[in-house]
Image (cartoon, rainbow, N blue to C red):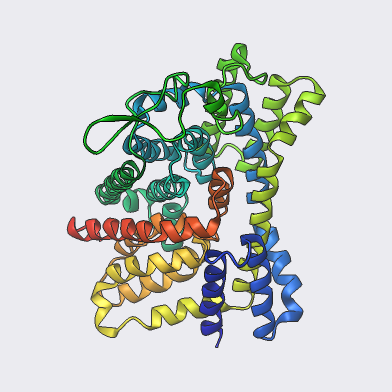
Amino acid sequence: MLTVLGFTMIATFLVLIMLKKLSPIAALVLIPALFCVFVGKGAHLGDYVVEGVGKLAPTAAMLMFAIIYFGVMIDVGLFDPIVRGILRFCKADPVRVVVGTAVLAAIVSLDGDGSTTFMITVSAMYPLYKRLKMSLVVMTGVAATANGVMNTLPWGGPTARAATALKLDATDIFVPMIPALAVGLVAVFVLAYVLGRRERKRLGYLTLDEVLEPESEPVLVAAGGSETPRPGAGGGAADLPEAADFPGLDPERATLRPKLYWFNAALTVVLLTAMIMEWLPIPVLFLLGAALALTVNFPHMPDQKARIAAHSDNVVNVAGMVFAAAVFTGVLNGTGMVKHMADWLVGAVPEGMGPHMALVTGVLSLPLTYFMSNDGFYFGVLPVLAEAGAAHGVSSVEIARASLAGQALHMSSPLVPAVYVLVGMAKVEFGDHTRFTVKWAALTSLVVLGAGILFGIV
């Protein structure tokens, strides 16, 4: 009964947000509350929610102060050179823009934090997508999938969880998986190229880099090779993008702090290093970083208040999503639906598949890490799969490696707080992002798993 209700609750949530019948925040709160009553545990709803909020509160705090920190860094011009460099590479060609998105997201993902990756990637690429009228779900989909593959880094979380749960060395899990993960990353770049070609076919591409030289008249290359003005682009001042859509290239904005550029760069490097080295908990690091960035760059109190207010929409939206997700995860875990769903899936594995438990684990990692938190999967389900594999001679390290395959899809799960940073900053509906991204992310995960099997890693 709990198994059926668990899958029904998740399916109801996904359908309603993809059809835009409910906002993500409303759906994350109302649907689990309703199902909690259905299973006869409505009296415990408060306990489940409080427990869920308690577990996600540090994440919400981290996201709040990370948004303020990186928002300030964007305001003061820290990322302007990165934006301009990417624009020069992209040259207003949709193919280059999408591939550049994938490359940037993959590089920034080296810090191991999805929220940071999405904030930097969207800050750099959003103005260009808006200026060229490109699909924003292409940006969010490519960024999320690239980050999902890179999320398997030992300091990214899943690998460390798998190593802890199965009492293995993280190096033994990750290093042999590098070839398969590299193939997965190549698959993301190929996907970006294909999606870019689709965007180029839809929009054409500009031969002049009018993004860097907005006074130039944009020229569209037609299918026959003739050049025609881009529709709606007259090249005059009236056609320039609004500052709100193109903040990274406004050299006159009052918040720029060129004299403090190297201080801000050093502060950011130290902050990211401290995250990777785990000198302090990440929420504490961003809290300290945001306070220091505000104080040094905007010493006057009215200016500090103005900067906080400027980013308050993102803070409220993302923090609200996280706490709403706490209701969803709290009910899933508190009612026991997650455990029953996992047990049912594991029990549904045919007896004859025992010798192929690594493959089974890899396939199951796609839906399970999408519908569950990484903690729930790696600490709750993975040990059961490892025991089943051991009974048929499959080593636990192979099971652990296979369990990483689903991470490309996991990063678009409604239970991942970072994805709300991505869609919030990109001004994309979560349902649109899900409908577009899931198929591509699942395909990328299967490519990783297939490469692992082909190379004899799993």
Residue 452 shown left or right of residue 109 in the figure:
left
Can you say whether 149 is above or below 396 in the image? Answer: above
Question: As drawn, is 238 to the left or to the right of 167?
Answer: right
66 vs 446: above or below: above
Location of residue 162 (image quadrant): bottom left
Residue at left offset 44%, top offset 49%: 144
The residue located at (33%, 81%) in the rendering is 349
Q: From this viewpoint, is residue 404 visible?
A: no
426, 169: nearer the viewer: 426
Residue 302 vs 397, above or below: the answer is above
The quarter of the picture where the C terminus appears is bottom left
Q: Quadrant for residue 193, please give it.
A: top left
Residue drawn 64% across and 49% down? Answer: 318
User: Where does residue 199 sit, x and y in percent of width and height?
Assistant: 35, 44
Residue at image coords 18%, 58%: 454
Residue at the right extreme, as displayed: 301
Number of disc labels: 0
Q: Quadrant of the N terminus?
A: bottom right
Residue furthest toward the top?
259
Q: Position of residue 14 (x, y in %)?
A: 53, 68
Identify which residue, 439 or 276, lies in the foreground: 439
- In percent of width and height, residue 422 lies at 53, 47
